[in-house]
Image (tube, helix red, strand yellow):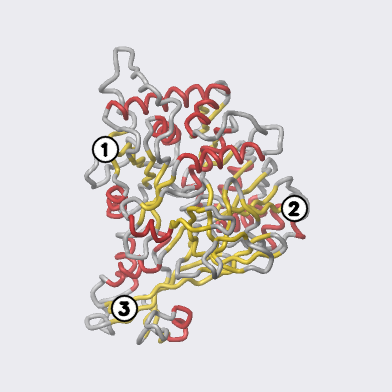
Amino acid sequence: MSGGPSPDSLVALLTGACVRHRDRVAVVHAGRAHRYAELDAESARIAAGLAARGVRAGDTVGLLGPRGWWRCAAVLGVWRAGAAVNPLDPALPVERLARIVRAAGTRLVLRDPDTAPVPADAEQVAVDRIGVEAADGSGQLPLPAGASASDGPLAYVVATSGSTGTPKCVAVPPVVLADLAAWHRDRWRHPEPPRTLHAASVGFDVGFQELAATWAAGAELVVADDATRFDPFRLAEFLAERRIARAFLPVGALLSLAVAVPVTGHRPEALREVVTAGERLVVNAEVRALFAGLDAALVNQYGPSETHVVTEYRLPPGDPDGWPVHPPLGTAAVSAELLRLSADGLLRPFADGDEAELQVAGRALAVGYLGDDELTARRFRRLPHVDGRMLRVYATGDRVRREGGLLHFVGRTDDQLKVRGYRVEPGEVEAVLGRVPGVRRAAVVGHRRGGSTALHAYLVLGSGGDGDGTVDAARLRAACAAELPDYMVPVRFLTVRELPLTRNGKVARGDIGAAATGTVLR
């Protein structure tokens, strides 16, 4: 499938699709089908309402609420207003939501009418009220000149775990999504547009990929609620009954789905492509059984929040028994240029046998971190290429090796972890635990089991916490849950006499397990 305008403008790409496919279904939510003409009109109303409230190009607008029709229309409406979307998940602790609103410099928050406001200093409006006060007698607002075809400087910001204990906001320009959406559209090899599952967690950049890639193709976006997304047995039934052709699933969700399908008897026969990312892909017996007999490709994608998707490896339909257990990252995707920094200080392409930290250049790069120029300068640098060019590159922190023309993941150059597809900086969890009375020091490490990672916290207890019962798992878990998303709350808390250190005085995380006293806090 191909066609449509140049992807240089995300708004032009998507509003053009609304015009060309106005009679097709754009979003299916709660049993109701919303056509592209309705998406066009509703997003225009929201854009005009935002402009009437003073939102301008370059501002950040928070969207607070679950996946659904109004949120889909609001995303496009924010973009048409030239603003950036700050996705706010109502399931997050309120204090964390407030921090994200502040860190992103959020100008205004659009919220679901049934969702309570965020306790933060930002104007907040229910989405069904936006534009109502300023509308003329017809109930319509004029769309600001140029709003239907012009991109703002940013498309979205996403909050990621920060090593200092505070989430950092990655700011991504529209060209990243425009390129990615057109790339997906032009690579679809089936006659019917890809009816696509919309199940990515609110606040996860994959959710924007689901929207943009689906609408650029004039396809249906089918919204799954959280009860379905979190239950692999319900998800299996949903995929089969809704005849979903394309699904973007974290590795953990894919593994759970593969177990659930034979139990439920609901085989997703319409699936043609499953795209997975977030953690290292493991192709086990259950995954092979799921894809046996399906005319569906399994696609392994990789890319940090600072670049979105930069590599892809496609496991072709028809031979899941021949798929490797750990598929490679693959080759460059979309517009990414994959490089290494050599000892002479020059950027070079990877040759077979090279192993180094992956540096990414090209149009896929984020602008940086909002409000943190120092971190932006450290992670996004301009460096000389061996061919004489000066390139802006992002240092991923991921060490990769090239073999047979394909990149393979080796490991991290730092302590960063991936849990359920989300980035976790152990330092952010440790900062919360360190504020609990009775905890002298804390170290958080990841333990791999069954293809997923779980967090374990190792604690050195001080006065008031060693043996008198004032520090227990419930108290520690509550402290984490009050400030952190659920995937960052450790599943186990263990005591150690001291944390093992390296010769440089840093915590030797690989040796912590051996230092545990065997006491599990309960």
Of the residues tagged 1 and 2, which is closer to the observer? 1
Q: In the picture, residue 470 is in which quadrant?
A: bottom left
Residue 40 vertical placement versus 257 (above, below): above
Of the residues tagged 3 and 2, which is closer to the observer? 3
Q: In the picture, residue 512 is in which quadrant?
A: bottom left
Q: Quadrant of the N terminus?
A: top right
Residue 160 vertical placement versus 144 (above, below): below
Pointer 3: what residue? Answer: 441
Q: Earlier in the sequence, mark 3 or mark 2?
A: 2
Which one is in front, 145 or 246?
145
Q: Amino acid at mark 3?
A: Arg
Pointer 2: what residue? Answer: 292
Q: Is residue 256 visible?
A: no
Q: Residue at x 49, y 33 (%)?
A: 9
From the viewer's perspective, tell me whether residue 431 is left or right of residue 174: left
Across and down, in percent, residue 102 comes to 27, 49
From the viewer's perspective, tell me whether residue 4 is left or right of residue 497: right
Which one is in front, 239 or 427?
427
Across and down, in percent, residue 40 comes to 47, 24
Q: Is residue 80 visible?
A: yes
Q: Amino acid at mark 1?
A: Gln
Q: Amino acid at mark 2?
A: Ala
Pointer 1: what residue? Answer: 124
Across and down, in percent, residue 333 comes to 61, 49
